[in-house]
Image (cartoon, grey):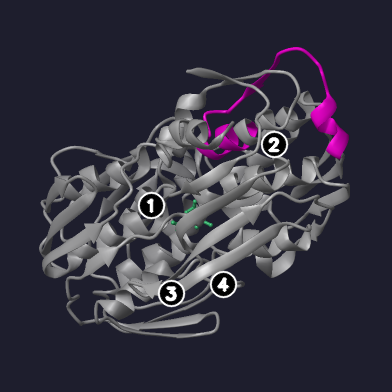
Amino acid sequence: MQTTLSKSGPLKGEISVAPDKSISHRAVILSALARGVGTVSNFLLAEDTLSTCSCIKQLGVEIKREGSRLQIFGQGLHGLRESTSVLDCGNSGTTMRLLSGLLAGQHFFSVLSGDQSLNQRPMKRVMEPLRAMGADIWARNNDQNPPLAVKGRPLKGLHYRMPIASAQVKSALLLAGLDADGESVIIEPERSRNHSENMLIAMGADISVHRNEITLRPGRELEPQDFLVPGDISSAAFFIVAASLVPGSELLIKDIGINSTRDGIIDVMREMGGKIDLHNRRIIGGEEVADLLICSSSLHGVRINGEIIPRLIDEIPIIAVAMAFANGQSTIEGAQELRVKESDRISAICSELSKFGCEIEELVDGFVIQGNPALSENKSENTQVQSHGDHRIAMSLAVAAMCLQSDTQIMGTDAVSISFPEFWDLLNTIRS
Ligand code: S3P
């Protein structure tokens, strides 16, 4: 699919964005392991999270859906069944990595595969620590990439210092550790998103967290919960930047999860001069939630690196768009993980933003942008840009296109259905 976008007038109104993807995946997986029926309200109905649902169903767990509310008939830690066919994780790295941890300690054999993009992504990061727990797990291309084959067997606990901050790897190890023989201790270099820990605590697991160190003692059954999923800050991010950049905008984004391991974009946009107010702060289902009021403002360049990177890793493509239209130079470093996401996001951002006339230099672990508010005056006719099959690149380019004088044609826009199927409709309701 291709989409043509033109310059937008002020963005006004009140919106809700897609439910949180990370929390939706985890709510289904953890509920499947609980003993009894759990529910998930405001579940994200998008390709990635539906991949998780279909894999979990293949493992013998019944899921009933009414609108965006799921009822999950948990089978306990030992009640999953072998799937008769390959578990298709689609485009979803979270599905594949979390399930590899879950399946490593089961009493049956599983094969996990994905689409062309997922089957190129690195899996050794999760396989190595799982093997240290005793897992029998193999992968294509000398154990680098999916498909993965997992012959479940009893596991032992693990003391592991993670070389990179990854919530997917951490969560896979926690899932494997739930039924291992002995405690697991996982130490992260920087804190990554902590939804798995929060949900496991709520479900009664014996888990404690001290700064970057998580200790899990196995053996407790998980109690089913009624999870309520907040709005996804990673989806709100496109509207935060759009309303900051388009003059005259005033946009209220309701019910957004502002968990402190996810809110780096708010800090960075404020540091750039963005006007973001948080209203109605409250706790819903163990997660902090707020309504975000965004007013347009003039932005200036910043330098980002270090511990903030995992707190905004998925938002870097859209932050790059904010930087392109800001005054002065911006730099992002220490984000080499972006090279192994749904696309090589460093290369994708650099090639596509330069098509708009943005001056951007690629680094191994980030980029340097010479920001220029006058970029929006660029009148080059009908620029054509590519999503690289990556949902977050597609939506970032849409926001850039809304700031430009002339029309932009974005190729591969169907990718948004991975995380935010209503993105285009929502955009049309608020733009003038
Ligand atoms: C996610 C963790 C992050 C993030 C991804 C979702 C999760 O990946 O980029 O979009 O839900 O655990 P890594 O664990 O590879 O950092």
Name the residue carrying label 2: 349
Q: What kind of element bears circle 2?
A: helix
Amino acid type at image mark 1 = Pro
Q: Relative to residue 147, is residue 385 drawn left or right?
A: right
Query: Which callout, 3 or 2, points to the residue nearer the camera?
Result: 3
Of marks 1 and 4, which one's residue comes earlier in the chain? Answer: 1
Of marks 1 and 3, which one's residue comes earlier in the chain? Answer: 1
Q: What kind of element bears circle 4?
A: loop
> Residue drawn at (61%, 31%), measured in percent from left and top?
398
Of marks 3 and 4, which one's residue comes earlier in the chain? Answer: 4
Amino acid type at image mark 4 = Arg
Q: Is residue 28 above or below residue 384?
A: below
Amino acid type at image mark 3 = Arg
Residue 282 badge? 3
Query: Which callout, 1 or 4, points to the residue nearer the camera?
Result: 1
Q: Is residue 101 above or below residue 288?
A: above
